[in-house]
Image (cartoon, rainbow, N blue to C red):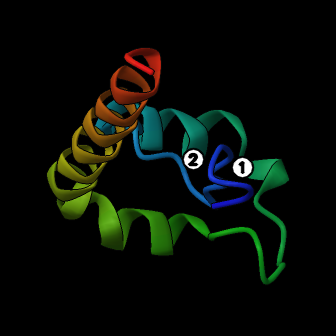
Amino acid sequence: MYEQRVIGLQFHLEMTRAGVVRIIEHCADELVESRSIQQAGEMMAFIDHLAETHRVMDTLLHRIRRANSREADW
């Protein structure tokens, strides 16, 4: 959180199983060795946890919306 207004995420909470597979299939040349780039095997190992990341995204967006609603009431 930056200045109570900006949230930076290092991953895509909205990613779906099909999206992960498409990235691996169509962007393989961009999956280079790097500390900040997951390799195909790492992505596939996490694929069963996507429902959990979607719940995190829903919670995050709900809390942002609720916080913005409170500010609008001021």
Do callouts 1 and 2 mark residues in contact (Cβ within 8 Å)?
Answer: yes
Q: Quadrant of residue 16?
A: top left
Q: Amino acid at mark 1?
A: Ala
Q: Is residue 67 above or below residue 4?
A: above
Residue 23: image location, x then y, percent: 58, 39
Residue 68: image location, x then y, percent: 43, 26
Q: Return the mark for residue 24.
A: 2
Q: Which residue carries the number 1 mark?
A: 28
Q: Quadrant of residue 25?
A: top right
Residue 9: image location, x then y, percent: 61, 56
* Residue found at the very far top of the displayed protein: 72
Q: Circle 2 sits in a helix, a strand or a loop, which is it? A: helix
Q: Amino acid at mark 2?
A: Ile
Residue 74: image location, x then y, percent: 45, 21
Q: Is residue 28 above or below residue 10?
A: above
Residue drawn at (17%, 48%), measured in percent from left and top? Answer: 55
Cα separation, mark 1 vs mark 2, equals: 5 Å
Q: Residues within 10 Å of mark 1 (few under 14, many from 20)?
A: few
Nearest the camera: 55 or 37? 55
Residue drawn at (15%, 49%), measured in percent from left and top? Answer: 51
Q: Circle 1 sits in a helix, a strand or a loop, which is it? A: helix
Pick the quarter of the image with the N terminus. bottom right
